Each structure stands twice: as structure tokens, then as C-alpha cells.
Amino acid sequence: MEESVIQIRNLSKSFGSKKVLTGLSLDIKKGSIFGLLGPNGAGKTTTLRMLSCLLAPTSGEIQILGYQVGPQNEQIRKRIGAVTESPGVYGKLSIWDNLEFFASCYGMSNLKADRRIEDLLKYFELWEKKDQLAGRLSKGQKQKVAIIRALLPDPDILLLDEATANLDPVSIRKLKDLVLQSAKQGKTIIYCSHTLSEIDELCTEFAIIKGELLTHTTPAQFRHQWSTYNVILHVADEHEKAARLLSSLPLVQSFERRGEQFHLKVEDPANANPSLLRHLIESKIPVVFLEQSSNSLEDAYLSMLQGGAHA
Ligand SMILES: Nc1ncnc2c1ncn2[C@@H]1O[C@H](COP(=O)(O)OP(=O)(O)OP(=O)(O)O)[C@@H](O)[C@H]1O
Ligand SMILES: [Mg+2]
């Protein structure tokens, strides 16, 4: 049994009379990159703020690395780094001074902090700008400073709330590589994002919430459960005829035309495809290719949240 480093039990949060999160329970394993998904207003940031000890739960319990959120916040704060939605940097301080200040808050020695700040600034290509006032930085540059701030103490738990927002593709790649590498070293990352390809690429498991837990799954399981197609057929011509044929074949459970292609759902592509191909060729439909293909996590997510046919 893998060790769980974050245990969330029956967590609820209300603001006044407004309930924003009810009865959330999750176990997050050491060394995992755990995705947190859900529509706008679902309670993701609220959950991360409670995990960062910035916001007290209305009820329920959170244990992080064996410490209890609430009475043991101080111990927890030393071990987590969080990138929140609004990068907290002091505009009137230079990048370097901002980071030195945050390092001192983490209790890092000057020597250790300076070396770490230099490495991270170089990694995120901000070294040349280290003496610039943080207030004059671009959105993406500010975001990088916020990311570096969270990484400074080399935290065991990293909470990333839409951390790739405003970053350019090269910087996104760098952040993703860093996340993957951190997980390999046994760090645990909670990765909150609306970009499903990022969740798919990075996360071993993920949860979808919407005021409560909707599902806790893995990308492969989720895709299988909510897949809308598993075969792609590309025909050069005769699309109407192909559509008529596909609707008459019992082995095709459903299909949808997308431009020159059809996305088909069949029970077992390995068995169904040879027979499907024979039918198409016998009907003189000009097949360009027929291939097994899983749909994207995005397709599966839309299929679930827009009320798919099965649960
Ligand atoms: N301080 C607050 N006071 C009152 N309501 C709040 C407060 N903070 C958050 N909320 C409400 O809680 C709900 C959840 O907000 P939260 O920021 O957690 O959503 P989210 O899942 O992060 O959404 P997004 O994808 O847009 O970032 C929203 O309806 C929001 O208006
Ligand atoms: Mg949010």
C-alpha cells in the first residue's frame, strides 16, 4: 500500500450562508501528481487554500505529512509551496529582493537561499532581469517569480493553481519537466488546471469536483469510461454513402462525422475493424485509413460534464 501524504476527510467550506464545498474526502499518495479539475467556481482554489493553511475549513479534517491542518499549520507551512491564482509579489522590490524576502520567511540561510534563487532564476530565464522591479514585469514574468517563490524551500508538497497560466510554451515545458522530476524524487504535487492535455500528460490520478467530489479516477480509466469513440475512419469521398452504411452496421455502436473523418464507437476495435473494412470496401467507399484511436481527455470530460449517456 502506497503511503498517502494528504488525507482529506469530509471537508466542507461555506462563506456565510453560501456552501461552496461539501463532504470532500480524498487520499493523495506520496510522489503522485494529482490533478484537480472542475468548472469555474467548483471550489478548486478554495480547496487549495485550505490545504495551504490559508483558509480554515468550516468542517472536516485535513492531514498533511502526518500533521493536522489547524493546530499544526506551522509545521505544514514549512513543507509546502503553493502557487496561487494571484501571484503575490511586491511591486516595489526587485525580483531578487522579493525572493530573498520570501526565502527568509521560509527560514532559509542566506547562502542556501542565494544559490537556490540563482538556480531557479536561471532555469526560468529571469536571471538577467533579477534587479528589475517586480511591479514592472509582464504577467508571465510575475507568474514565474510566484513559481520560484513556491519552489524555494524545495517543498515536499507543491500546490499549483493554474500555474501555467500566462506562461509561454517554453516555460510551460520547463515547469512540466520540473513537476515530473519532483514527483520522481518523491515530492507530491497537486496540479489544478483547466488544460486537460496537461492533466493527461502529467497526472497519475485526478479528481473532478463541483461543490463536491464528482469522480476520483486515472486518465486511462476516465477515458475508457467516457470515451465517445475508439476508431477513426477517413474516407476520400462518398461521405453520405459511408454514413448510411455505418448506421446500418450493428457492430458500429455510434458514429459522428467530423469533416473528412468519422469517429466511431465499436465494441472491440481489434475484432470489429477487419469486418468493418470489408463492408466499406465491398460498398466501394474510398477508405484512406481506419485506425484505432482513443479520444482525448477533453472529449471524455465534455462527455461527462455535458451529461453523457452512461456513468
Ligand atoms: N472569500 C470568499 N467569499 C465568498 N465566496 C467565495 C470566496 N472565495 C470563493 N468564493 C466562492 O466560492 C466558490 C468557489 O470558488 P473557487 O475560487 O474555489 O472556484 P474554482 O474552482 O477555483 O474556480 P475557477 O476555475 O474559476 O478558478 C465560488 O462560487 C466563489 O464565488
Ligand atoms: Mg480557481
Image (cartoon, grey):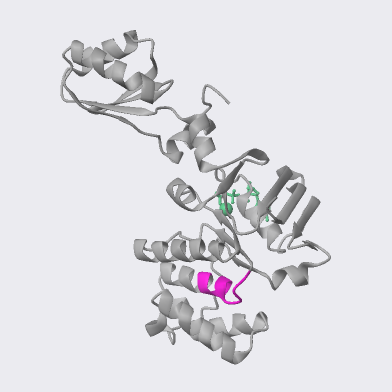
Q: Residue furthest top?
A: 248
Residue placed at 60% from the left, 64% from the top? 187
Residue 266: image quadrant is top left
In magenta, the rendered stretch is 147-155
Out of 196 and 204, give the one closest to the viewer: 204
Give how far across and how far down residue 155 sits, in percent.
62, 70
Residue 211: image quadrant is top right
Q: Is residue 306 left or right of residue 212?
A: left
Give how far across and how far down residue 57 sits, in percent.
77, 54
Can residue 254 be found in the magenta stretch?
no
Give how far across and how far down residue 278 sits, in percent.
24, 15
Out of 42 and 24, give the one closest to the viewer: 24
Q: Is residue 246 left or right of residue 4?
A: left
Residue placed at 57% from the left, 71% from the top? 150
Out of 169 and 97, give the one closest to the viewer: 169
Q: Residue furthest right?
A: 71
Q: From where the camera sits, is residue 92 visible?
A: no
* 214 versus 290 height, above or below: below
Q: From where the camera sits, is residue 235 visible?
A: yes
* 159 versus 252 height, above or below: below
* 225 versus 50 height, above or below: above
How many callouts does the rendering have? 0
Residue placed at 36% from the left, 33% from the top? 293
Residue placed at 45% from the left, 51% from the top? 201
Can residue 150 be found in the magenta stretch?
yes
